[in-house]
Amino acid sequence: MDNPSSIDAGPDGTEVQANVSSTSALPQEELERLTTDIIGALKTVYDPEIPVDVYELGLIYKVDIEDDRSINIDMTLTAPGCPVAGEMPGWVSDAVSSVAGVGHVNVDMVFDPPWTPDRMSEEAKVALNWY
């Protein structure tokens, strides 16, 4: 693996930031643009049973941006038996692949730690009346 830069989701899904390796071959401005654009792309993917995008739901656990601009994503589902479990990683890959300058996109489904509603952003909680 090259020197990755990472976007890590906090426990409530809102504290996502780029952790940029000081030895990254990509210029800082490029990493910031990719980070912003990848988050924007992730916000276009919705769980079909919940009217909130996968990013705000806190389903995206990690995004690594490699020096060659390939992207590795760890994501989860609200429940392992989710009916779109086989399709959602493809939707996420397609959305991120549409970002200018992105290379190959790999999406891994992970279930550790398990998703809980605590991972949702405030925006998602408001949209779902989760109070």
Image (spheres, grey):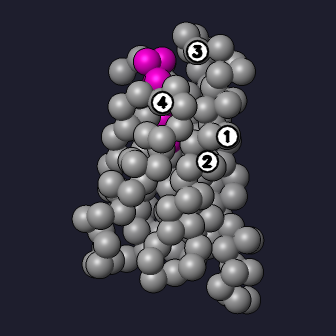
User: Is there CB contact under 8 Å for labels 2 and 1?
Assistant: yes
Of marks 4 and 1, which one's residue comes earlier in the chain? Answer: 1
Give me the C-alpha separation between circle 2 and circle 1. Answer: 5 Å
Residue at the disc numbered 3: 26
Kind of residue at disc 1: Thr
Q: Are marks 2 and 4 in contact (CB under 8 Å)?
A: no
Residue 102 is labelled as 4
The boundaries of the magenta stretch are 63-69
Q: Could you say which disc has been placed on residue 36 in the image?
A: 1
Residue 34 in the magenta stretch? The answer is no
Determine the secondary structure under disc 2: helix
* Label disc, if present, on residue 10 of the rendered structure: none
Alpha-carbon span between mark 3 and mark 2: 18 Å
Please name the residue shown 54% across and 31% down the image.
100
Q: Earlier in the sequence, mark 2 or mark 4?
A: 2
Question: Label 1 vs label 3: CA separation?
Answer: 15 Å
CA neighbours of label 3 inside 10 A, class few (<14), some (14 to 19), many (20+): many
